Image (tube, rainbow, N blue to C red):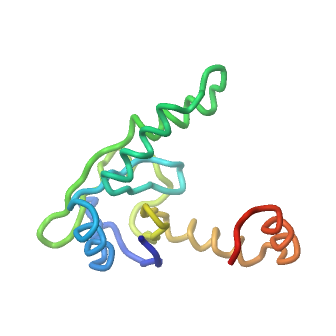
Amino acid sequence: MFGGAHELSIDSKGRLAIPAKFRDILLRHYTPSIVVTLDSREKLLMYPEAEWAKVVEQLLRLKTAGNQMLQRYQNLLLHNADTLEWDSAGRILIPANLRKRVDFEKDVTLVGRANRLELWGRDQWEAEMTQALDDDPEELAFQLSQTDLQL
């Protein structure tokens, strides 16, 4: 399982060095390749191929008839997916078509989130964390009490 956040930089050629911690997880539990796709203007999603296959199954079962927003999101994920392998230096080349669609260029944060990685612009990630820390703790406690989550 992936966890942690790493502040990184995308170089001038569009390459991103994947931290050894994440590469080790991929090599131990998956394959040395990763599927990258567009999620929003804020972030890219990165999945081990086996995990991406599960996502694709769910996306293809998704009932999108009559819901254009869900159809567009399904298309966004599926049409922009690209399988990448890292080079001898542990870098992946983020495809140009994905780089031009996100609101970040160089300074990024790579975040582990259970079965996937998320690549955020550093400013967007900081704003997301600030918002999470500023959420009303009592309202959060109430919202959590309405779920099955036990921490």
Residue sitting at 31 percent across and 48 percent down? 96
Residue 76, percent from left and from top: 48, 37
Q: Is residue 67 above or below residue 2?
A: above
Q: Residue at x 64, y 74 (%)?
A: 129
Q: Which is more toward the observer, 4 or 134?
A: 4
Q: Residue furthest left?
A: 88
Extreme residue in the top direction? 66
Q: Would residue 104 be found to the left or right of residue 51 on screen?
A: right
The residue closer to the viewer here, 30 or 65, is: 30
Image quarter in which the C terminus is found: bottom right
Q: Is residue 38 above or below residue 33?
A: above
Q: Residue at x 63, y 26 (%)?
A: 68
- Residue 137 position by quadrant: bottom right
The image quarter containing residue 93 is bottom left
Q: Position of residue 40 (x, y in %)?
A: 53, 49
Q: Position of residue 39 (x, y in %)?
A: 50, 48
64 to 36, vertically: above or below: above
Tell me the residue at 44%/45% (across/down): 55
Q: Is residue 137 left or right of residue 131?
A: right
Quarter of the N terminus within the rendering: bottom left
